[in-house]
Image (tube, rainbow, N blue to C red):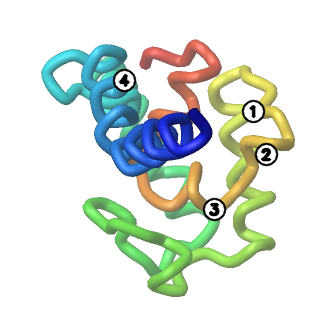
Amino acid sequence: MRYYFISHLWEWVRHWPYLVQIRDWLHYPLGVTQTAVASVQFDKESMNNVIAILKNIRPEFDFAGVDDFFARGMLDSFDLTVLVSALEEQFGVSIDGADIVPENLRNVKAIAALLGKYGVAG
């Protein structure tokens, strides 16, 4: 009986990545992710406002189309706090401390997803 349980447990663990994919497919039909949904709702004017905020913080860089501001050295940890403050002021939201991480602010799409989480649709 114990062998039967362990072998079935191993099968479940072995297939865990596929179960997670199935869960994601059910949660986000047709491969639409939360970031994609937020960026669709985020209009061009709001996107330009975010880029203007970034340019105000670091005018020497062109932020449009960059995949990771922190990996490219365009922003640092101090800039992150300035960016969050400016986003809160511009869009009238209060960003939770747990969401103030580089992953949520690494590019314009990630910022759009973060603002979308707080109800900013553009």
Which of pointers 3 and 2 lies earlier in the amino acid sequence? 2
Q: Of marks 4 and 3, which one's residue comes earlier in the chain?
A: 4
Q: Are marks 2 and 1 in contact (CB under 8 Å)?
A: yes
Query: Which residue carries the number 1 mark?
Result: 89
Of badges 3 and 1, nearer the viewer stands 3
Front: mark 3 or 2: 3
Who's the residue at 45% across and 84% down the image? 72
Label number found at residue 102: 3
Report the residue at 82% width, 33% height from top. 96
- Camera-nearest residue between 56 and 72: 72
Residue 85 is marked as: 2
Query: Mark 1 belongs to which amino acid?
Result: Glu
Q: In front: mark 4 or mark 2?
A: 4
Please tell me whether mark 4 sits on a helix, a strand or a loop.
helix
Q: Secondary structure at mark 2?
A: helix
- Identify the residue position indicated by label 4 in the image: 23
What is the x, y in percent for residue 37?
32, 22
Asked which secondary structure carries label 3, the reply is: helix
- Residue at 58 percent across and 13 percent down: it is 119
Residue 82 coordinates in the image, percent (x, y): 77, 58
Res. 118 image quadrant: top right
